[in-house]
Image (cartoon, rainbow, N blue to C red):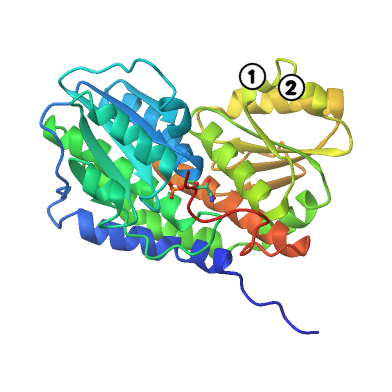
Amino acid sequence: MESKQTSIMQKEIAEEPSVVKKLTETYITADNEIKLELPEKISNIVIVASGSSYNCAAIAAPLFVEYADIPCDCEYSSEFVLQKKHFVTSDSLYIFISQSGETSDTLNAIKAIKKEGVKTLCITNAKASTMWNLCDYKILSDAGEEKSIASTKALCAQIFCSILIILKILSQKGEDISGYINTMRRLSAYLERIIMASDKIKNAAQTVAQYENISILGNKNYYPVAKEGALKMKETCYLNVMAYPFGEFMHGHVAVLNQTSIVIAVIDEENAVFAQRNLEKIRKNYNPKIICITSVQDIKAGDINIYIKTKRKLKAIFGSLLTLQLIACDMADILDKNPDSPKGLTKVVKD
Ligand code: AGP
């Protein structure tokens, strides 16, 4: 039998370890300094983006609050431009994230907020793009050209750059960031290990591909990770996959489950007890198939448990995201869909 060609999406996912390695070398010096230019004073941050880049914003926003102690919100670009009033102080920083640097909704959002004289920063994969030229501060996410319409490595790079901003803010406050830097330096090898051990992931994809009622659950930073997994399955397999925060799911949404549905749960140290308790209730009342993607070694709540073992949240976010990307890509293959030419989608969404 003729073997199938590796898709561009698959190749780009496989590049993630080298993308984060390159970013580490570019932006972190041997003396653990972060080579980024930021405003000296930042009172609050708003991150604006679309699609996968928005999911990066939603993953990063609670990290800014938790690690850098800075109020941070995120908004969809398309909603941002419809809003009549934005919260702005002289030290507010508006961050815009875009792989292409040319997405109309995000460019319109930058133009709208610039009228208020606010400081702007972009994270983009396209140097000299319109976004690059519009913003005051610029970070190149440097993932290399991303051809796949379903974004993968670019998102990984955007999250990495968002964390670099957090670490830079912490170092500007005089805090010791060497522990976090060690974590970021080890990220490439961690992602490599997940890719190498992808048999269980393939097995999970075989299982998920048999279902049409698919729910992905995660808490806090992992809720946008779940949303990203759902977005990848929509774009590559044309399935109506839904993502929910774990607790919220129990408020009625859970009623969509039955024996012909599947739940994918993203579990880390912080939500382990809560997630397992809810999964028990879900199994008892609805008996769906359950897959757990977990950074905690002894979780056995799923019919399939994929371990992406780490105690570091900053690594687990990337690991769970990578696992969902791989599942989506494998599912497309199993369902005989070509992830490189998704129906009716274009790489850059313009007006
Ligand atoms: C992601 O897989 C999508 N193709 C899409 O959501 C994309 O992330 C969105 O259109 C934003 O694009 P940008 O990052 O180039 O602004």
Residue in view at x 25 percent, y 57 percent: 128
- Give the amino acid type for the residue marked by disc 2 in the picture: His
Q: x, y percentage for residue 81?
A: 41, 27
Label ID, residue 253 = 2
Q: Say above or below: 259 vs 99.
A: above
Residue in view at x 85 percent, y 27 percent: 286
Q: x, y percentage for residue 215?
A: 71, 35
| The N terminus: image quadrant | bottom right
Which residue is nearer to you in this view: 34 or 138? 138
Q: x, y percentage for residue 347?
A: 51, 56
SS at mark 1 in the image:
helix
Q: x, y percentage for residue 13?
A: 51, 61
SS at mark 2 in the image:
helix
Residue in view at x 48 percent, y 43 percent: 351
Q: Is residue 124 left or right of residue 231?
A: left
Upstream in sequence: badge 2 or badge 1: 1
Whether residue 297 can be seen here: no
Q: Say above or below: 189 vs 68.
A: below
Q: Say above or below: 221 vs 351.
A: above
Label ID, residue 105 = none
Which residue is nearer to you in this view: 48 or 178? 48
Number of numbered discs visible in the structure rendering:
2
Label ID, residue 248 = 1
Q: Say above or below: 261 vs 340.
A: above
| Cβ atoms under marks 2 and 1 closer than 8 Å | yes
Q: Is residue 24 left or right of residue 136?
A: right
- Give the amino acid type for the residue marked by disc 1 in the picture: Glu
Residue in view at x 55 percent, y 32 percent: 223
Whether residue 100 can be seen here: yes
